[in-house]
Image (tube, helix red, strand yellow):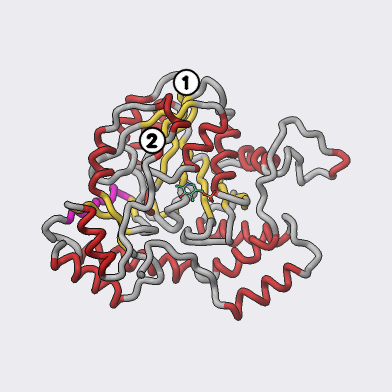
Amino acid sequence: MLSLVKPYIAPKEEMMPALEEILYSGYIAMGEAVGNFETKFGNYIDNERVLALNSGTAALHIALCLLNVGNGDEVISTAMTAEPTNTTIALTGAKVVWADVDVKTGLLDPESVRKKITEKTKAIMLVHYAGMVCNMDEFNKISEEFNVPIIEDTAHALGSKYKGKMVGSNSRFTCYSFQAIKHLTTVDGGAISFLNDEDMDEAAKLRWFGLNKKVSRLDNDIKRAGFKYGMNNVNATIGMVQLKHINEVIGRHIENGRYYDSALKNIPGVTLIPYYENTEPSYWLYTLKVENRDDFCRMLKDAGIEASQLHHRSDTHSVFQQSKCDLPALDQFYSEFVHIPCGWWVSDEDRERIVDLIKRGW
Ligand SMILES: *Cc1c(COP(=O)(O)O)cnc(C)c1O
């Protein structure tokens, strides 16, 4: 079966010696290797203000904590995402306020977000779903106009661009995931990037119980209790080897995505998704809209190709019951969208076969 997702692990000859060395080095906790990974990853996203964490969930939670989001506050978010985007908001005690999506893209609709802003709004959570980038031109305007910060959940969108720059230095907080099936995996892990040093220093404390690594343990005074959210040297070492291949891995997602963008044009029953001005997707998944989706998925499955929605909309969970509201554009998008395989493991032959099958109809 040609799958929708697959972990990329660098060749054994590169990975195993590095892993063996760190495992028996006597220093496997958060140390130098983590700092080296942060430097390398920072180079990749073109933002040196970055902290490595043990998950993307930790990154989201830290961003919310830095904004002091808590009981009585509201965070505007999307239901068109994986669960951690919104469970982390719930963890703080704040209310998730759903905004609707743009029916053409499935990404948050700036007009809907604008309507949902109140005095209680502490943050806008943007998800670059499947690697497609949100309408940042509009969201930046809204953020400025209402003085509400943006948190970018970019778990799906490493390597995507806004105005020619990597997603990662546009908003006050950008959150990454290195979970198994993401573009870059460290087995499990995450990172958060910042625009200023104060946020970064405070986050560095929150990731390590509230302790300040720059001061000796004896002179430390915890003012705010933190978490145990740091990455360790083992995952960081894996990440460093993985990063050597990041351009070829993400490059292949992008090549395949662009191939579909042109090869799937003008096919009856298929609607392609437009990308916003100044944005370039990194195609973690390829997303399209089809008529008779169940039949479409069955046809591909019979040919050995996985196709599905992969994610379930988040607003149906009981934990978000109080947030229930009408989301007509999401209803519409959700009934039509589907993903087809597009990652580094999809060969030229595979993608041509997929397009041929779709052209023949379902
Ligand atoms: C994977 C993912 C995360 C973070 O997941 P972790 O497993 O904690 O790294 C956050 N948001 C989205 C949309 C994701 O897909």
Q: Quadrant of residue 333?
A: top left
Percent coordinates x, y for residue 229 in the rendering: 66, 46
Mark 2, Cα crowd under 10 Å, few <14 / some 14-19 / many 20+, is: few
State which quarter of the image contains the N terminus. bottom left
User: On screen, 323 above or below 305?
Assistant: above
Which numbered mark, 2 or 1, is in the foreground of this view?
2
For residue 251, side relative to residue 179 (left or right): left
Give the mark, 2 or 1, whose residue is nearer the N terminus.
Answer: 1
Mark 2 lies on residue: 316
**Residue linked to disc 1:** 120
Instruction: Label 1: state its secondary structure.
Output: loop
Please tell me which residue is depicted at 23% across the width and 40% down the height of the picture.
Answer: 332
Q: Which quadrant of the structure image shows residue 136?
A: top left
Q: Residue 329 placed where, x, y %?
A: 25, 36
Is 243 part of what is drawn in magenta?
A: no
User: Looking at the magenta stretch, what is its main secondary structure?
Assistant: loop
| Residue 311 on image: x %, y % | 38, 48
Name the quarter where the C terminus is drawn.
Answer: bottom left
Cα distance in 3D space between marks 2 and 1? 23 Å
**Alpha-carbon neighbours of circle 1 within 10 Å: few (<14), some, or many (≥20)?**
few
The magenta segment is: 270-278
Measuring 21% from the left and 58% from the top, which residue is drawn there? Answer: 296
Examine the structure image and report whether residue 276 is included in the region drawn in magenta: yes
Q: Which residue shows up at 64% across the image and 41% down it? A: 203
Q: Amino acid at mark 2?
A: Thr
The residue sitting at 59% across, 49% down in the picture is 49
